[in-house]
Image (tube, rainbow, N blue to C red):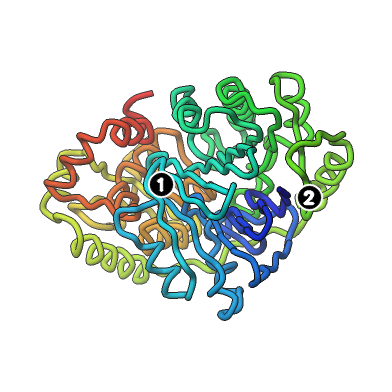
Amino acid sequence: MNIQFLNHACFVVEHEDTVLLCDPYLSGTAFNDGWDLIVEDVHYEFDPAKKNFIYFSHEHPDHFSVGFLKNIDKEKRKSISIVYQETRDGRVKKFCEKMGYGFVEIPDKKSYNMSKDFVISIGQVPFYDSWAAIKVAGKMIVNANDCILETPDRVEDIKSLVGKCDILFTQFSYANWVEGGEANSQMRRALAEEKLRRVKMQSEVLSPKFIVPFASMVRFCHTENKYMNDSINTPEETVEFIDSKTRAKAHLMMPYEDWDGETGKDNSEAILYWKEAYEKALVRPLIAPKEQVSEAELYESAAKMYRRVKSKNSWLLIQLLSRAGVLPKLSLYCSDANKRFVFSWHGGLVETKTNHNDPDELELSTRSLKFVFDFDYGVDTLNVNARFNGKKSSKKKMIRCFSVLALNNTGRYITVTNTTKMVLDVSFLKQGLKTVGLIK
């Protein structure tokens, strides 16, 4: 067995004639120009003579990179199969098969034998994440990527399936908006510390021999979110934390580094590599805001969104939920246009001259607002790229309001029947209530 790290959340496991590539985002920006990579333009070439697989943990663009898939030669695609969690709508499967890739859809906590002594199991985490248990040549590798594993019971769920864990790959720094704005770095530092506590909790439950910190080698690359870089956990801090606070050994890897999964090492060289890489990345030019979107374009994007939602959901039920405040009204300030709007599902998008002293007003650019309207994953992207300002309560209202789109993005639609099913799905309901801040 050989493990090769490439970049961010991407690594390769190879055993005999079989290759598994995980979450290949290797170049370019992600999340609507919100992120880029600390180390740019790492490359990977498939060998068509081997049995090639790509595991995607979820559809976030720093994991599921459409650009990477498009850049693979069409002839080589025939020798590559995508491994993905079973979904309601099969959208990812249809997309990949249309591009010429093979596809293996794995139900929750089920296994697939890629070859002799090389098995992958996938576990789903609401709403769209998944983790992978990769058993190869007698070794168990858990790829937790950036799954929402904030409680021990979530990690116990993994433990019940994998038993012994030899190597844990896990996220080590924050990757989304944090309350407090540019002036309040304490909130960001607190979240960074929480991420490390989750690494410790995962280690206590899974008892891995090695922890590979990854899935955090990115920077917030836009002028609107650059301040988010001030409190991130560095690889050096993370290695020190793992070595001092867990029973596992930290194994920090550099791009193209190979590892047999058994031999420990001195992390000094990797620490120095990433220290220099971060220093260079954090002074690279930032992406500047593009020209503002006109009011007419915003209204047109909102109208297209309504038509998209009406075609697959019960519009009457959405209207009722909106009027009842379950899907709340939003106060929006588009700073680049110096205009204020009110949005609700029953009242539409309306310009207003005042914010009515709404303490939950959200500030964002017209382009970011248009992005939310244009794509079902837009509100999730906005939360991750942190290109908005407001309070925590503002963000929760935004997520509740646009939860219709977020649900549609996972193949769930607002109808009487489907809504009843979602309410009866305890784990899904619990995570949803946590996400919108109705329970802790």
Secondary structure type for disc 2: strand
Q: Is residue 362 left or right of residue 57?
A: left
- Asked where in the image residue 29 lies, by quadrant, the reply is bottom right
Query: Which residue is at 43% across, 71% downward?
Result: 97
For residue 74, above or below residue 198: below
- Residue 60's tag is none
Residue 184 showing in the rendered view: no
Q: Nearer the viewer, residue 25 or 29?
A: 25
Residue beneath disc 1? 128
Q: Earlier in the sequence, mark 2 or mark 1?
A: 1
- Asked where in the image residue 37 lies, by quadrant, the reply is bottom right
- Residue 258's tag is 2
Q: Amino acid at mark 2?
A: Asp
For residue 422, above or below residue 73: above
* The C terminus sits in image quarter: top left
Secondary structure type for disc 1: loop
- Asked where in the image residue 264 lies, by quadrant, the reply is top right
- Between disc 2 and disc 1, the foreground one is 2
Distance (Cα) linking label 2 and label 1: 30 Å
Q: Amino acid at mark 1?
A: Tyr
Farthest residue, direction bottom: 75
Q: Residues within 10 Å of mark 1 (few under 14, many from 20)?
A: some
How far across and down, in percent of the image, does residue 153 sit?
44, 23
User: Circles 2 and 1: CB distance less than 8 Å?
Assistant: no
How far across and down, in percent of the image, does residue 210 sit?
71, 31
Q: Is residue 415 left or right of residue 233?
A: left
Q: Nearer the viewer, residue 276 or 12?
A: 12
Q: Is residue 345 left or right of residue 175?
A: left
For residue 53, above or below residue 191: below
Residue 151 showing in the rendered view: yes
How far across and down, in percent of the image, does residue 256 sit?
78, 55
